Image (cartoon, grey):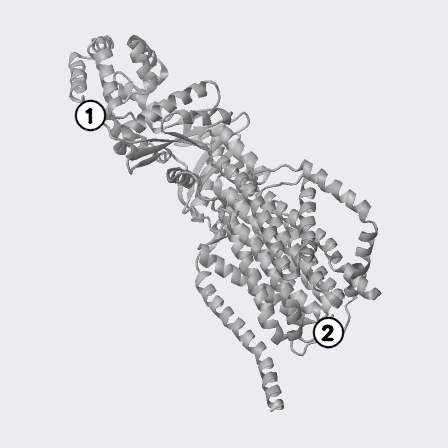
Amino acid sequence: MGLGKAHNRKQLNEGIPKLTAGLWLLGMIVIGFLGFQALTKDWLETSFLALLPANEQQPEVAKAIQQHNALINKKVIWLTGAPTSQEAIGHAQNLKQQLEQSRLFNKVVLEFSQQQYIKQYQQLFPYRYQLLDAQSRDILAKNPDELIRQNLEILNSPIGQMQSADFERDPLLLFSRYFSAQNPIKLNLEQGIVVLSDQYRYWALILTDLQDDRLQLDKLETLLSLVNSAESQIKTAGGELLVSGMPLFTAHGAESAKQEISTVGVGSSIGIIVLLWLTFRSVRPLFLSALAIGSGLFAALVICVLFFGKIHILTLVFGASLIGVADDYAQHFLCDSFGEKDWNPRKSLKFILPGLSFGLLSNLLSYAGLGFSPFPGLQEVALFSAVGLLVAWLTVVLLFPLLLTGFKFDHEPGIIKLTTYWEQHWPLWLLKNRRVLSVLILVFIAGGLWTLSPQDDVRLLQSAPAELLQTADKIRSLLPITHDSQFFLVSGKDQADWYQHEQQLLERLQALKQQKVLTSVEGLSQYWPDENQQQQNYQLLKLKLFDSGLVERYMTELGFEKKAVLAELEQFKTTETNTLTLPDWLTNADESKQSLWLGCNAGRCQSMVALTGITDLSALPVLQDLPGVVWVDQVESVSSLFARYRIRASGLLAVAFSLALAGLGCKFGWRNALTIMAVPVLSLAVSLAMLGWFNQLFSLFNLFALLLVLGIGVDYGLFFFMAGDRRASTSLGVTLSALTTLLAFGLLATSSTEIVHAFGFTLTAGIVTALLCAPLVGFRGQKNDNHG
């Protein structure tokens, strides 16, 4: 009976690894099936704007920002330069062919057709007595004779000769004035092409819109290739090319992220392979490590795409760095095989499972902190990393016992002698010099924290080449039509209420324009008068020009026949009830003006007032004291959101440390818990001090990096605490774990994107400190045992 039970127990023990491996395989087949469905669609996000949170303000503000961004998110401006305007136009005509052949754009505009202006003129002309520009209205109200005098000057000038065709239909030139004011920036046209100039060159303008604003990676790569090719060709022909637009900034960001994924992914992979080969001298550990990492990354990618619909390319930069952390579990398992002679994988798993599990929980807790932020980019990193680590952990726990059955290393790696020597002598040196070192560390930490200052600018998310920024500034100086990112949102309970509010705002803005606070301002009510204003315009004309007889005298003196004069008077009389509605006006307006109107719904009418060339931002938010006016500064609002969540993340960090301490205290006792937690606490303090001493960026992202330092620090301290008589193999596992993690996260510190660099720098400082402090945990106990 006893032999039968033992035999059954043996069969059960042998069957458990097969069962757990089967469960792992089933799970990966399910993930593979889901991945086949998810990854065949457009799943990669490249737009910088996708990293930003949905606006925390009212829905209408979010809608305005979305509409504002949609307009700029697919526009690319091209300027071809040459010593003469004809050469510049020639370069532009050749470039236009290239752009059309690329099939990237749904609109390529070189020749600006007069048909649009003619159609707009014809549609608005019947309402000419209701439509007055602000300057004409002001002159009429104060001194109508001055308007007549100006008309006579215009008619006797070269410009007047050009307007003679419209003179018979618009003898007072009122509609000509209004129509001219619709386009305040006058652009020089040659052959229907906009030609700009500076003191060195002439520039021909091409405006393009991408086919869609999804900015897929392959299209961004094509765009960059197209720009480089066109630049080379035009330069060879003796010209110059300037290109700018949000898609180009996105393309450069995506290209940089791709290179960083390659650097981090390939660099850390090669480093890990070399390190593992030198340590284990066997293909099987390399294969198992690759399996744990690969399954974790693949599962993370699939789950993220299923959950979010798309995954940002910057998430993959952080994801590539996960290689170093995901490999930790495999290394702790493999390194434990050097701890005893009669090693077997099931017995080893039983010994290291508490440490692996608590390390996983502390890491998951850290990544959960990222998930509570309102930033889609950080939420993606949190889910990607959490799923990646969990699946890597499951691979080690469920699959390794079967794949390592019967496996035993037949050598002692050279590095274990180094790590054993270091683990035995380094703590002794620290304890021997603890007084001096304590003072030095306290001074170092205090000095670093004193110089630490937070930076919450959202623009640090994007790393644009200096050359691209200079080009954008150059184009803006040549073509001052690009609106700034800040704007006003104006609302009212109905159209009349909205109109009144916007007019009050525009009046204040015109005063600021006179003070050079901004270059120009654009609001719908500058161009379209509401029904009430249209009637006021008509009555003003009636009072000042028609009823006074001024029109008759003016036309008679200019030689108009009596019949023409009477026809003008009759036409004026019959159009008294004409009213041009806003929808009718908008159908003939250009795209930029149409985009300013947000519509009327739910008892509210809204529009945006766009600004250009702001020189003093502080003078504008105060205008929110006007009724129905909201100042919208997307950069500032998201930056302030960064600042608020940085403070919240600090609290989250404290909560995470408290939870980890409580968990350890319940499991190992409070004294031991404090000893283990000293490792991540000191690591965090040193990381922050390093940021201060080296003048590094300190923002929300650094705090989330510190959450990971917490997880890693607890991991290292816990493994040394539980090592017992296996401190040699534990020091090997922790050292390899730290080196591989440093290979991954340390490479992030080479990133050209400020926040990615700061993330990598913070983690590098924390991991190095954790590695140096961890051997102190449990060291005294071992020394006492030896003495015994």
Q: Based on the displayed image, in which of its 4 quarters is residue 20 positioned?
A: bottom right
Q: Nearer the viewer, mark 1 or mark 2?
A: 2
Is residue 54 visible in the rendered image? The answer is: yes
Disc 2 target residue: 409
Front-most of 99 and 309? 309
C-alpha distance separating marks 1 and 2: 95 Å
Residue 633 picture location, percent across and down: 47, 33
Is residue 313 visible in the rendered image? The answer is: no
Query: Residue pushed farthest bottom?
Result: 1
Q: Which of marks 1 and 2 is nearer the N terminus?
A: 2
Q: In this view, does 467 lie to the left or right of 713?
A: left
Front-most of 576 and 123? 576
Crowding near pointer 2: few (<14 within 10 Å), some, many (20+)?
some
Disc 1 target residue: 578
> Residue visible at 73% across and 66% down?
724
Residue 610 picture location, percent across and down: 41, 30
Which type of secondary structure does the marked residue at label 1 adopt?
loop
Q: Looking at the picture, which amino acid does disc 2 mark?
A: Phe
